[in-house]
Image (cartoon, grey):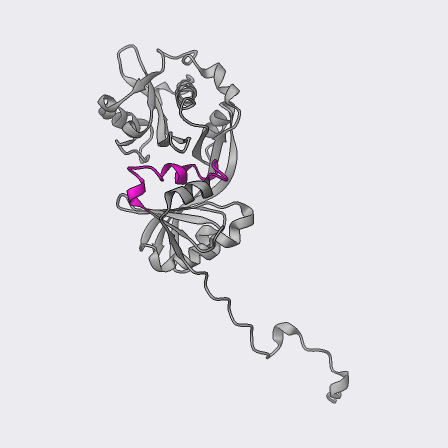
Amino acid sequence: MPTPPPSTRTPADPASSTAPAAPAAPPAPLTSLHDRAALAERFGRDPELHLFELGDLDEPFWSHTAWYTASADGPVALLYAVGDVPTLLGLARPAQADGLAGLLDAMRPVLPRRLLAHLTDGGVDALAPDYRAEHRTAMLRMALTEPAALAPHLGGAPDGPGPVVRLGAADLTELRALFAAGYPGNWFDERMLTTGPYVGVRDAGGRLLATAGVHVHSAARRVAVIGNVTTHPEARGRGLAAACTARLCEVLADSVDHIGLNVRADHPIALALYRRLGFTTVTGYEEAVLTAS
């Protein structure tokens, strides 16, 4: 078939055009942040999303932190360098997802070869293919929004062996034994016993059966993150975790305005517990171990 004259040819498909592609956008500039007051103001606009960041502005955490942004008012990422594997924390609302992806892309030169990432949706993939993700886990950030729901659980569990009591440094060995039995692999640093309250329940013989404590507690920033909620396997199903968590929230209410926690999205028992206690979901995020490819 003869080739149609130029005036009758179908217009070219832009996708197959041989015209040169538009130049790629330059990478966002990376800025390191050091002003604690400015960071506190920035995170204070959305405190339930940024509970960890606000708490980490205090010592002993502050000295181990590095903070980065790629825009004057966009997401901020925290690199926390404690332990064998540093932690990268980057949480953003959906409207700032692209900004977080751009920030993570700009951070590639300053990231360690191996890290534990806590990133909102798309953050882990934004670092591929330079980083390979392992142990990816869907998580939820929850916040106490209905404190009245705590009341039925205060005063101890109905089937509990005794009252919920405060714990301290003298209870460290027992706490470690309880975590080994009921929550192996949890994140616990003995300094947490001095930076925030821990509570627990003992049986008639004095053995520690359940506990609840904090990962972060900042009276200066008025925030706390509950963690290490644990019941011994032999004592589960008796309401001990609910009693400990409710009492802990009651203690924290004297010094903070915002209480939150992190929980696996695929843990229905824990989710049901926290919802009964008045916690609601703030955001989903992903936890993963990232290793440079």
Residue 247 position by quadrant:
top left
Q: Give the answer, above or below, for where 132 lies relative to 8.
A: above
Picture coordinates of residue 171 (x, y %)?
Answer: 24, 22
For this rendering, which residue is in front, 255 or 259?
A: 255
Taking the spot 77% from the left edge, 83% from the top edge, the residue there is: 8
- 66 to the left or right of 239: left
Residue 224 position by quadrant:
top left
Task: Say whether residue 25 is magenta.
Answer: no
Q: Kindly tell me whether residue 142 is visible in this rendering.
A: yes
Q: Give the answer, above or below, for where 127 lies relative to 146.
A: below
- 286 to the left or right of 232: right
Taking the spot 40% from the left edge, 25% from the top edge, the residue there is: 255
Picture coordinates of residue 154 (x, y %)?
Answer: 44, 15
Picture coordinates of residue 169 (x, y %)?
Answer: 24, 24
Which residues fall within the magenta stretch?
A: 44-65
Taking the spot 42% from the left edge, 30% from the top edge, the residue there is: 222
Q: Give the answer, above or below, for where 202 lies relative to 216.
A: above
Q: Quadrant of the N terminus?
A: bottom right
Task: Say whether residue 46 is magenta.
Answer: yes
